Amino acid sequence: MNNEFSKKSNIFKILLIILCIIFNIFIIFKTKDIEIICITLVFSLVVVIGFFIYDKMFQDSITEMLVKLSDMISIISDLREKEVFSMIDDSMFSKLQHQTLKLTKVLQSQNIKIEKDKNEIKSLISDIAHQLKTPLANMKMYSEFLQDENLTKEEREEFNEIILLSLDKLCFLVESMIKMSRLESSVISIKPTLGDLNDTIILAITQLYKKASIKNIHIDFEEKDKVIIYHDKKWTCEAIFNIIENAIKYSESNTTINIVIERYEIFTRIDIKDEGPGILEEEMAKIFSRFYRGKNVSEEDGVGIGLYLSREIIAKQNGYIKVSSKGKGSTFSVFIPNDYIVEKSDEN
């Protein structure tokens, strides 16, 4: 216990004993009755002994309470959920313990989130390193080949073309990762405004017209009469662009991609249907993962970021994407809410 408190307690004990002695001496001088003197002496002894017993009990109680409080602090530091005081008693310590347990749960939750974020960062760094490795290795290797003075003109052109392709892939990968990073960290905010969804889809199709024409793929878009809804035109176009680009990339030549808009009471649905190889059922839950690529399209060029970005963009507008595939061909259904609800995170 506190030294200052102990000193005061000892002084009080001495004063009590002195007062009892003085009181007994006074009684002895005032009366010669032995019975009264004995009763007074016994009463004084009972008071002194009672006080010492109470003081000992008080000290033990305080010590026990301090030990329990120490255990509570230990529980917080160890992030354990354990009751030290009875939760049935409506006492100050039970209330304090309740708040301690709440704090412990909050700290546990934060620790889990920190660990999750840490693992995600490690995974992201590993994925980025893996994705950068191939184009960088190709550029280094073929640059070294170009140092050979005995190369023919055709070989030099071939190696230069490989280097340029690797550089294009590297630039695309870095740009995609920058977009992904900005979206995840909310550096880029989605700002939905009222606009015609037809115009957004046409803009995405226009940017992909050349790619589709090279493979003689026809993009059939059934335009509706004005579909005015809240959406971020730029980023929604990016999301739709990624899905259509995937459809072009993995579809065979001389096929068709159908795009249909269907407006419902709460959501507007955009169906993008291709005639590609389809998606295996066990992979449907994975295709929107970062850097994931399906087994049946692994030979095609790509890094597996497009669908991940599309899902993030639509999710930030309170929408979602569903995919269905039966055998050959896939249908990606994008659902965007007609009325954008501002969330607390958007207001800040």
Image (cartoon, grey):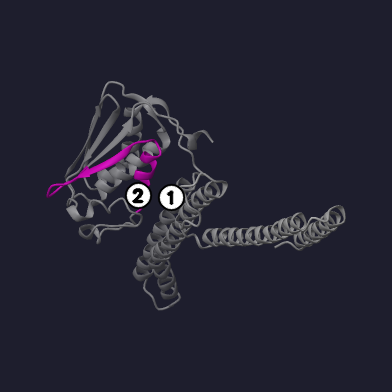
Marked residue nearer the N-terminal end (1 or 2): 1
Q: Residues within 10 Å of mark 2 (few under 14, many from 20)?
A: some
Residue occupying the point 29% across, 41% down? 321
User: Label 1, label 2: how many angstroms apart (C-alpha)?
Assistant: 8 Å
Amino acid type of the residue tagged 1 in the rendering: Met
List the residue tagged with mark 1. Answer: 180
Residue furthest to the right: 29
Q: Is residue 297 magenta?
A: no
The magenta region covers 305-331
List the residue tagged with mark 2. Answer: 308
Q: Is residue 325 magenta?
A: yes
Position of residue 285 in the picture relative to residue 191 (left or right): left
Position of residue 215 in the picture relative to residue 114 (left or right): left
Residue furthest to the top: 225
Q: Secondary structure at mark 2?
A: helix
Q: Residues within 10 Å of mark 1 (few under 14, many from 20)?
A: many
